[in-house]
Amino acid sequence: MTRRNFLRSRINRYKLSAGLREKFTVNGQTFILSDRSDGYFQIYPIHPYDETEYHWAKGKNETWNIYRKGNLKFRTNRMNYEEVAEKCLELDRKEGLERTGGIW
């Protein structure tokens, strides 16, 4: 099984009122890909009980902007959402951001 097929098989799709959302995992980190219903998609990591603001992305048609604390940190073209999530993790590591843990 290729890496891409493995990732696709791990995606858990569910509907919410805001639109389609996909839950997927990259390098052990869970992300949400959501349809913002304004033509853009958003990717953000799930960190329960952790108030650190991590990198997240907003994009359309394989063009993505990666943000942290409201500031544009990286712009990319021709990346799928799994690659964008990997780039968010890479930027988190470069800035020394690590999950601080939760209540469990």
Image (cartoon, rainbow, N blue to C red):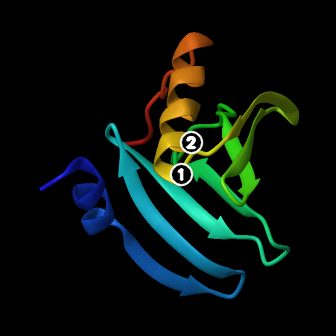
Compare residues 100 and 26 and report the one nearer the observer: 26
Vertically, is 95 above or below 76?
above
SS category of the residue bearing label 2: helix
Residue in the image at 69% along x and 88% along y: 17
Q: Residue 74 in the image: x percent, y percent?
A: 74, 28
Compare residues 32 and 86 and report the one nearer the observer: 86
Q: Residue 84 in the image: x percent, y percent?
A: 56, 42
Compare residues 6 and 62 and report the one nearer the observer: 62
Q: Is residue 2 left or right of residue 87?
A: left
The quarter of the picture where residue 67 lies is: top right
Q: Residue 78 in the image: x percent, y percent?
A: 62, 45
Vertically, is 17 above or below 7?
below
User: How dense is the environment of label 2, judged by Cα within 10 Å: few (below 14), some, or many (20 and up)?
Assistant: many
Label 1: which residue?
Answer: 80
Residue lying farthest front? 78
Vertically, is 32 above or below 71?
below
Residue lying farthest left? 1
User: How dense is the environment of label 1, judged by Cα within 10 Å: few (below 14), some, or many (20 and up)?
Assistant: few
Residue in the image at 58% along x and 33% along y: 88
Q: What number is the disc on residue 44?
A: none
Vertically, is 26 above or below 98?
below
Label 2: which residue?
Answer: 84
Compare residues 92 and 4 and report the one nearer the observer: 4
Amino acid, disc 2: Val
Amino acid, disc 1: Asn
Q: Is residue 65 left or right of residue 94?
A: right
Marks 2 and 1 in Cβ contact (< 8 Å) = yes
